[in-house]
Amino acid sequence: MPVDLGLTGKVAIVTGAGGSIGRGIALEFARAGAKVVINDIGVSLGGTGERSSAPAEETKAMIEALGGEAIISTESVSEWAAAKRTVEMAMDAFGRVDAVVNNAGILRDTIFHKMDPADWEAVVGVHLNGSFYMSRAAAEVFRAQGSGAFVHMTSTSGLIGNFGQANYSAAKMGLVGLSKSISLDMARFGVRSNCVAPFAWSRMTDSIPATTPEEEARVARMKRMTPETNAPLVVYLASAAAEGITGQIFAVRLNEIFLFNQTRPVRSVHASEGWTTVAIAEHAMPALRPSLVAAQRSGDVFCWDPV
């Protein structure tokens, strides 16, 4: 018999669900029998422009075509009061919240030495602050229920590295720390928290440069990775079938699922008399140097074609 995901009648909030990866996740929840709160403000990739409910309405119509049930929140995740209103909407409409997927995001890519502080604040505000606000707003509900699951969408731009994305990379690495803290603090309430780094061709990757043959080949590979390929793992992590899985970092790349390692000591040196600056230069660093991590981009590590 197939594994029972236990999602029938449960309620999932998916931020940034008006398109791309978020829409795929929302639809996958609906297929699994969950009710969905579609959170999306319908602005540009950079987080600018007039708000529109049109993207969320499209997702809602697709869920209803599947026989599912959904409501729309056009509240901004980057504002504490607005995040609370999204959770309140879910409680008013469905009486419970069982999963929160922090997927909403914007991009304002600029090489570091030219990055405007406003672009830093905007990206961190949506990705990191927004994930905290949504998670914190749902935490009281989860604690009262004695159950709940968070899935935070991180990125290999933070886990590994990328050019021109200091704001995005820092926010995505911050999500890893947030998820770990939630998993530790809320385990006693039956709450789980995990991260997923998605690979997908979407409007968030459409700006990747393709000016050389190598870059063109990389973009061609990425276009095979459609947004919806990330949804099954996210929905699984939010389901009862994922009991006991918490504090982890996963990635999805077409048909591949990866479990990432996490920061732990890899090598040490000891001096019984203590270290001086000169002794570090002469002895400590030469011993540690073979274990240093190379400065690489995500594409350097994931250098084979997706399978």
Image: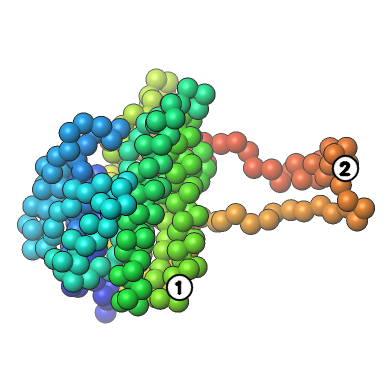
- At x 34%, y 29%, the residue is 207
Indicate the quadrant containing the N terminus: top left, top right, bottom left or bottom right: bottom left
Tell which of 253 and 194 is nearer to you.
194
47 on left or right of 162: left
The kind of residue tagged 1 is Ala
Furthest toward the front, the residue is 81
Vertical position of residue 8 compared to residue 205: above or below? below
The kind of residue tagged 2 is Thr
Q: Secondary structure at mark 2?
A: loop
Q: Quadrant of residue 2?
A: bottom left
Vertical position of residue 106 compared to residue 142: above or below? above
Tell which of 124 and 307 is nearer to you.
124
Vertical position of residue 143 compared to residue 267: above or below? below
The numbered dot on residue 276 is: 2
State the separation of the CA atoms marked 1 and 2.
43 Å
Q: Which residue is mark 1?
A: 187
Rendering coords of residue 52 (x, y %): 14, 39
- At x 8%, y 52%, the residue is 61
Question: Crowding near pointer 2: few (<14 within 10 Å), some, many (20+)?
Answer: few
Furthest toward the right, the residue is 273
First along the sequence among labels 1 and 2: 1
Rendering coords of residue 229 (x, y %): 30, 51
